[in-house]
Amino acid sequence: SQQGEEDPQALSIQEGENATMNCSYKTSINNLQWYRQNSGRGLVHLILIRSNEREKHSGRLRVTLDTSKKSSSLLITASRAADTASYFCATMPRLGSQGNLIFGKGTKLSVKP
Amino acid sequence: KAGVTQTPRYLIKTRGQQVTLSCSPISGHRSVSWYQQTPGQGLQFLFEYFSETQRNKGNFPGRFSGRQFSNSRSEMNVSTLELGDSALYLCASSHSGGANEQFFGPGTRLTVL
């Protein structure tokens, strides 16, 4: 079953704008990770945030985590056409996951030049 | 360091046949996980191998099996193929498993006719 649900399912913006994607999950987690997937290819790890962290930055990426609301957001600032991809959140639940990541269905981001 | 490699990249089979997919992890990584990605179900965890032992298993029928060799290379096998097995099969490697960043291969696109 899906643990994370991304919102929106699809997002279309102009180059230079910021893109915000949200992820909600159901159970307590050890950590939450964001991945990017270019069309039909493998996933690329973007950032990992632990359950005791509230915010993390990496370049143009900013991730927040609110464990009380069981939600996370990924902000991409000053987007570029090359950011066009699908973005997935993946959670490592504390219990019941058997140690594997559980992925949401993703947000498809389109950045128009 | 070389990334995760998967072979073959594309495969076309007919119903009832069986298929074997291969994954070579990043050197030094002992954990290999397999995922199935379809438009309808998204990314679903198949199984994880660590030091030649299956450590975790997802909710897939027994037609899906795997193994890991002493050099950490892994194979997955699907017997008696069904149309619904058409998917992108991704493997991911990490030092110790899902709680850490996972490095994905480019995937094998399986089409069952």
Image (tube, coloured by chain):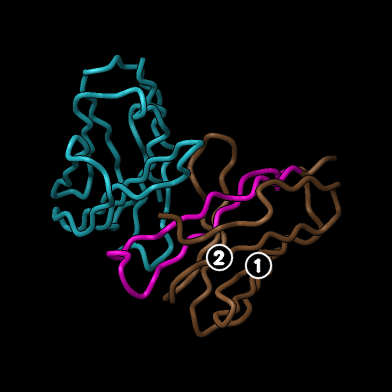
SS label for mark 1: strand
The quadrant the N terminus of chain A occupies is bottom left
As drawn, A80 above or below A75: above
Residue placed at 23% from the left, 58% from the top?
B56
On whether disc 1 and disc 2 are found on a single subunit, the reply is: yes
Mark 1 belongs to chain: A
Label 2 resides on the chain identified as: A
Disc 1: CA contacts within 10 A as few (<14), some (14-19) or many (>=20): many
* Residue displayed at 23% across by 44% down: B73
Q: Quadrant of residue A88?
A: bottom right
Q: CA distance from mark 1 to mark 2?
A: 12 Å
In the rendered image, which residue does mark 2 sit on? A47
Whether residue A92 is in magenta: the answer is: yes
Give the answer, above or below, for where A103 lies relative to A68.
above
Residue at screen point 29% across, 42% down: B24
Residue B96 seen in the current view: no
What's drawn in magenta, residue-wise? A82-110
Query: What colour do you see for chain A?
Result: brown
**Mark 2 Cα shell of 10 Å, populated few (<14), some (14-19), many (≥20):** some
Which badge, 1 or 2, comes first in the chain's sequence? 2
The mark closer to the camera, 1 or 2, is: 1
Q: Quadrant of residue A39?
A: top right
Q: Chain drawn cyan, letter?
A: B
Amino acid, disc 2: Ile
Judged from the image, the secondary structure of the residue bearing numbered disc 2 is strand
Residue B11: percent from left, percent from top: 36, 21
Q: In this rendering, would B58 be left or right of B107?
A: left
